[in-house]
Image (tube, rainbow, N blue to C red):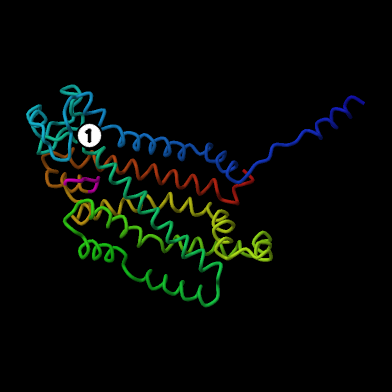
Amino acid sequence: MAARSTSAASADVPVAGTSLWKDAFRRLRRNRLAVFGFVVVCIIVLASAVGPFIIEHTTGFTYDYIPTDPALVTSLPPFTAPDGSFSWVHPMGTDDAGRDILARVLLGGRISLMVGVISTLVSLVIGLAVGATAGYVGGKVDEAIMRAVDVLYSIPYMMVVIVLLAFFGGRSPIGQLVLLFVALGAVSWLTMARIVRGQVMSLKAQEFVLAARATGVPASKIILRHLVPNALGPVVVYATLTIPSVMLLESFLSFLGLGVQAPLASWGSLAADGIQNLAVFPWQLICPGLTMAVTLFSLNFLGDGLRDALDPQMRKG
């Protein structure tokens, strides 16, 4: 009798519900590489944001893009080797102008991370708009949009970015940086549009979309309120994997002298400066290159972890 009452009482207790995002977060926490990548990315972002201010406060030197403090150049000889036992003032050494490489790497990280995130957001907005429209409307509109995407796929996107930067690039470093955001985002939305289109085409036949149509909800609201939120899983995964690819492309362009212009600096432009003195002062190339490599690896680990966590086939795990 007591066992029966206990089972009846336990049956009356409401079971806590779960969702796709809660399950995905639980699986993501089990992925050690993804957690490691997330922690490393957070550390690099935090260091790039506040690191130069801490260096300036603790050392008393003004580490700027162009050194204006005479004490900075005369504090240690140029190209000081990164030897902690010799001096902790410049743990990564200095460049030919006497500027601290650690501060330059952190300042360059701001630009590289900013380019990766903002360019990915630009591609995300364009890809969502184009892909959702093509997948929901269908018919001739879908055919025309997809054929245009195929034509754009056949064009070497690297050449397009180089032409845009060479033709529209101005003398202003800020203007060149904004153009870099737009150019990289404008060539990165094609795969995003295809992913969103496929998700929308599989969702538009669901009952909640048919019910919204029957009640007279406009197509724009159906796309924004019903289809796009339910397609965000694969979109978030691809956006996470797009950030490192955009950062690598920006570094390549800056290495060629077409990306970030002085007095601004990115990891690519710092590597371009370091390659000129590679034989004698290798740390000028190793320090920004190694930092960029660790960041790209961590972002890829995080993206792979999100892909596994949001995969419907993994929900049983």
Report the side of 34 relative to 178 (left or right).
Answer: right
Where does residue 238 sit, x and y in percent of width and height? 45, 53
Where does residue 142 sit, x and y in percent of width and height? 51, 73
Q: Amino acid at mark 1?
A: Leu
Front-most of residues 161 and 121: 121
Q: Residue at x 57, y 56 (%)?
A: 225
Q: Is residue 2 magenta?
A: no
Q: Secondary structure at mark 1?
A: helix
**Above or below 131: residue 8:** above
Q: Is residue 265 magenta?
A: yes
Front-most of residues 98 and 92: 98
Report the side of 263 relative to 70 (left or right).
Answer: right
**Above or below 56: residue 231:** below
**Above or below 176: residue 24:** above
Report the side of 189 relative to 47 (left or right).
Answer: right
Q: Residue at x 21, y 60 (%)?
A: 169
Front-most of residues 161 and 53: 53
What is the magenta segment's predominant secondary structure?
loop
Q: Give the extent of the magenta segment.
A: 263-268
Give the quadrant of residue 270.
top left
